[in-house]
Amino acid sequence: MSASGSKMRVVVGLSGGVDSAVTAWLLKQQGHEVVGIFMKNWEDDDDSEYCSSNQDFIDAASVADVIGIEIEHVNFAVEYKDRVFAEFLREYQAGRTPNPDVLCNAEIKFKAFLDHAMRLGAEKIATGHYARVRYDEASGRHQLLKGLDATKDQSYFLHRLTQAQLAKSLFPVGELRKTEVRRIAEEIGLPNAKKKDSTGICFIGERPFRDFLNRYIAKEPGPIKDERGRTIGRHQGLSFYTLGQRQGLGIGGVKEKGAQRGGGEHAPWFVARKDVEKNILWVVQGHDHPWLLSPALDAGDASWIAGEPPAAGRYGAKTRYRQADAACVLPAAADGALHLDFDEPQWAVTPGQSAVLYDGEVCLGGGVIAR
């Protein structure tokens, strides 16, 4: 309901998945006028086995039919390529590992889609994200909260949203557990009740990641070196590797007397550093090697949900999705940047990924990890 408890015109992003389907149904049950929109964000090879947008639209249309709402198919592929994919490639070419889901939410779902919905006369938009919005009377601001289902919470991906965007957004399934969402979908006979959750983004889908990047980024092979500076293999190009990566390195153990730090001669290798200038991939043996642990981080391009940085103090932070909040200290946040000091060193803190700050269940915002 709106603040006054009145019925609203709500435009729901229907993806073809069960979360957005139940979102639309819940809003209709509450008496709102609900319109569904299916967003098409990628079309380079969307007829391939890896990108299921055609099937997703069929599923979304079937859901709309069962719920009894209209659905519109809207193409945001140009905006996606310009605002999300171009940045995604730039980051990889610079040796970083970006998070396109964060960019997609900020630039497409809560910008291009929100603008389109407003043109359709919507008062609010809704998506199937596991997060919550709360209006805080004391500050006069909207807060982004974690979803009630801790195993599905997606506030990490929404941390760049602004006050204006949050004021127009609804996340009905953020109040539910995933098991309850599945139960509702089955109970009301939704055709996609048992559809498995999508993994990854459409333009990559389930395909081998390196194969996909190969189409857009030239290979620049170079040496793989260990902590002693010995060349122990060749890499295919720094863009194709991420910090903490263990699979696909093509190197075995280095046999010599004396165990390597962090494990013996057969301990697994992990990507620890990338020297873009010299095109060297540095690897170490052992999951807990010091090179993989960071007591602090610096991040740029900071975005704060309140519109200003939080006060210096103790907080929780995530440096990747699905990790527990790590206790940390935020000294005074500079304009557009933040520095975090962790109580315990964090594993494989990766440039290009997002560092997201929390005060309990409240998501405060975050930045892009620089180092």
Image (tube, grey):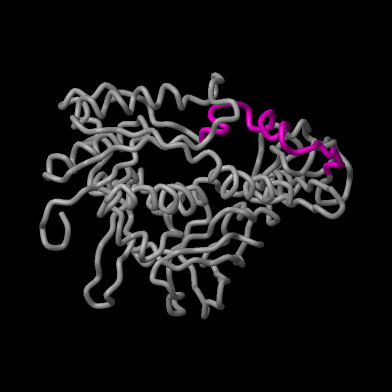
For this view, does 157 lie left or right of residue 6? right
Which residue shows up at 54% across the image and 27% down it? 206
Q: Residue at x 67, y 51 (%)?
A: 91
Task: Based on the picture, tell me whether residue 220 belongs to the magenta stretch.
Answer: yes
Q: Quadrant of the N terminus?
A: bottom left
Q: Please tell me which residue lies in front, 124 or 315.
A: 124
User: At which x and y percent is residue 224?
Assistant: 83, 42
Number of callouts in the render? 0
Give the quadrant of the C terminus. Answer: bottom right
Q: Position of residue 244 (x, y in %)?
A: 64, 45
Which residues make up the magenta segment? 201-224
Q: Quadrant of residue 250?
A: top right
Q: Residue at x 72, y 36 (%)?
A: 216
Report which quarter residue 60 is drawn in.
Answer: top left
- Please tell me whether residue 238 belongs to the stretch shown in magenta: no
Residue 143, horizontal then vertical, whole percent: 31, 65
Position in image of residue 232 (x %, y %): 86, 38
> From the viewer's perspective, is 96 left or right of 302?
right
Seen at 44% across and 75% down, the residue is: 308
Q: Main secondary structure of the magenta part?
A: loop
